Amino acid sequence: VSCGGRCRSPRPPPKIGEAEALTRFLFKGDFSQAAKTVKQRAFLPEVYKGVPETSVARLTHSSAERVAHLGRYIRHPLAALGKTDIKVASFGALDLSMAAAPQLCFGEHAVITGWPSGADPKAVWKQRAALMVQASSPVELL
Amino acid sequence: MSRPASSKEAANLARLLAEAGRTLKFAWSPRALAFNELCTIEINSAYQAPASTPTALAERFLTAWPLDLPTPEIGVDPDGEISFDWFGGKGRNFSVSLREDGRIAYAGAFGGAKTKYGTDRFDDAIPSEIVEAVRELRGKV
């Protein structure tokens, strides 16, 4: 999706604004169908190049068709079953940070970083994820 | 972790526990569905999980879970640990992750900034902090 710097005028992604919401695509097992609520595991980070991070999408201004398209292909061959949104403004209480992903000309991706480290950080990660679950919108099926 | 029973009383207790376990697993109930979900996870993990999934330990956790409390939803974390999830109203939630060495990591959000989290060990008994947290989530405190 990114131009990789090869296009005529490569642009860095725009900074994340306070009025934005960050979207997490949800796959099998990421949410409770009965409670219509996302589970903590959906927000738990994965370690990428030694750094724990959670990948999210920036779709505040995207059309429904674009959201559905990204949901189908973002983790191909797995298709997202739903999505949930978290307002950027609610991140102040989470003690986590977020950054626009560095790919040029691809403004639809961001990462949640700042996950605590340590010998066994799982419980602290789950605590942050629990707060994210509480702050996230009801699950929207795709 | 538990060892095979050696005395007559212990063997009798083990038989009673096994019978209770069969009743839990094969009755038509939320608890039986949770055992069924664990079974599905075990079958799937044999084909695709990166690390061994602690389903046997998770089965013991589910067996030890108090019957008067709601049955958790079962899942697998990205790192292969088995997760048990409970939900309250307004986004309140609590979750336990069980690693194959018996380490439990738990956390929950109970409205506003109130959270509880920590680690413990599962030794065939559910730590009291976890039971109390689920009671609080369901408004049973």
Image (tube, grey):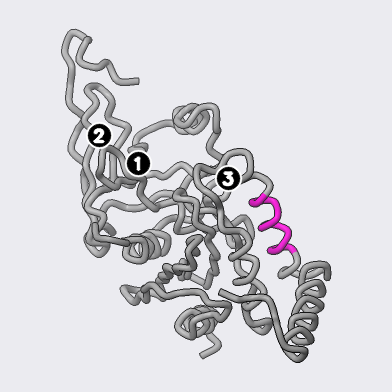
How many numbered dots are placed on residues in this image? 3
Q: Is residue B41 magenta?
A: yes
Chain that bears disc 3: A
Residue at the spot of label 1: A55
Q: Main secondary structure of the magenta part?
A: helix
Residue at the spot of label 2: A101
Q: Looking at the rendering, which quadrant does residue B55 occupy?
A: bottom right
> Is disc 1 in contact with disc 2, using a CB cutoff of under 8 Å?
yes
Residue most extreme to the top = A8
Side of B99 where B32 appears, left or right = right
Does residue A135 appear in the picture of this structure?
A: no
- For badge 3, the amino acid type reads Lys
Task: Give the x, y percent position of residue B88.
Answer: 52, 72
Residue at the spot of label 3: A28
SS for callout 2:
loop
Does residue B77 appear in the picture of this structure?
A: yes
